Image (tube, rainbow, N blue to C red):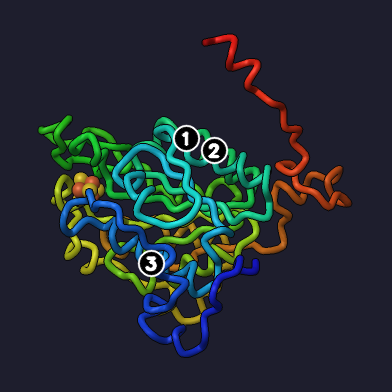
Amino acid sequence: MKSYNMPKITKKSDTTLLGEKSDLYKLYETDQAITWCAGCGNYPIQNALKRALTLENFGIKDILFVFEIGCNGNGSDKIGGYTFHGLHGRAISAAAGASLANPKLKVIASGGDGATMSEGINHLIHAVRSNYPMMFIHHNNLNYALTTGQASSTTKRGFPMNSSPEGVLIDPINPTEFVLGLNPTFVARSFSGDIKHMTKVMREALKHKGFAYVEILQVCPTYNKATSQKWYLDRVKYTDGLKGYKPNNIEKAKKLSHDMDNEIYLGVLYKKEDQPNFYERLTYRKDLQTTPVQEVNHYPINDLLNEFK
Ligand code: SF4
């Protein structure tokens, strides 16, 4: 996708701090007050996203960011561009609609583990099946952080949380392994403690034309003391370090994604580029030059609104 009247990234800036010093990067920054805790994984995640967009030369008018309720959702005013801050667990459904209404936009949704693996899990399942043309950043900090540290579907069994001080009684869902069971077209996992790796993975996801699922293992130093930055650093491994690993074998990807306790693999685990996305499957739109959003009739609504005065 071409940027919209935006400065291009030169080769020189491409090598400086992964794009952070470029003019394009600065357009993604805002002057809104920071509300995240010190040490929160949301800072590096959003930084990596801005770098990835910059390095892929997306202008701020090329993108729609869709957020939901949660700590990650509070990033909606901390990134420049078009943003929609919707309901808890419903970021994917809103983003899917937007991506089909205007397929010229790159739509990027963000959601937490609490909402996505519980209230919104149906949306995740059907978005993967449908291969909607969008990217989904799944912030997995293993708890409902905004509401002060309750266990989510990804909290590890036995961990004491505010809603379960004796320890969680049931086993967690492994999100990446779960998505790999849904016949996806792009699945990646990264870690909030490695900005360069997140940037690399997000750049790959931005190039994917279907549903690009990116799980980010995120530290939450305020409410999740058990999986700290050090805990992850002691365990993460990279598919890049696996000799001959190619992300084209879903059974290998499933095996690699399984372990979340000892050797946690990060990287683009699986991708399948030859599948049409949902919009491309709409054969009746094949020869149309317009997008659905351009075809909407505009009605004056003042008369309607006046009825309620
Ligand atoms: Fe980040 Fe956790 Fe604080 Fe939320 S509660 S802002 S996830 S550190």
Numbered circle sitting on residue 10: none
Numbered circle sitting on residue 48: 3
Identify the residue under disc 1: 90
Looking at the image, which is closer to me, 268 or 98?
98
In which quarter of the view is residue 198 placed?
bottom left
Question: What type is the residue that disc 1 sits on?
Answer: Arg
Identify the residue under disc 2: 94
* Residue 224 visible in the snapshot: yes
Secondary structure, mark 2, is helix
The crowding category of the residue bearing disc 2, from other C-alpha atoms within 10 Å (few below 14, some 14 to 19, many at least 20), is some
Question: What type is the residue that disc 2 sits on?
Answer: Ala
Q: CA distance from mark 3 to mark 2?
A: 23 Å
- The response on whether ligand 1 sits within 8 Å of label 3 is no
Secondary structure, mark 1, is loop
Q: Is residue 71 left or right of residue 52?
A: left
In which quarter of the view is residue 79 placed?
bottom left
Residue at 23% across / 41% down in the picture?
145
Q: Residue 262, position in %: x, y?
A: 26, 62
Residue at 47% across / 72% down in the picture?
24
Q: Residue 70, position in %: x, y?
A: 32, 40
Q: Is residue 151 left or right of residue 94?
A: left
Tell which circle, 1 or 3, labels the residue nearer the N-terminal end: 3
Q: Residue 7, position in %: x, y?
A: 54, 76
Q: CA distance from mark 1 to mark 3?
A: 23 Å
- The response on whether ligand 1 sits within 8 Å of label 2 is no
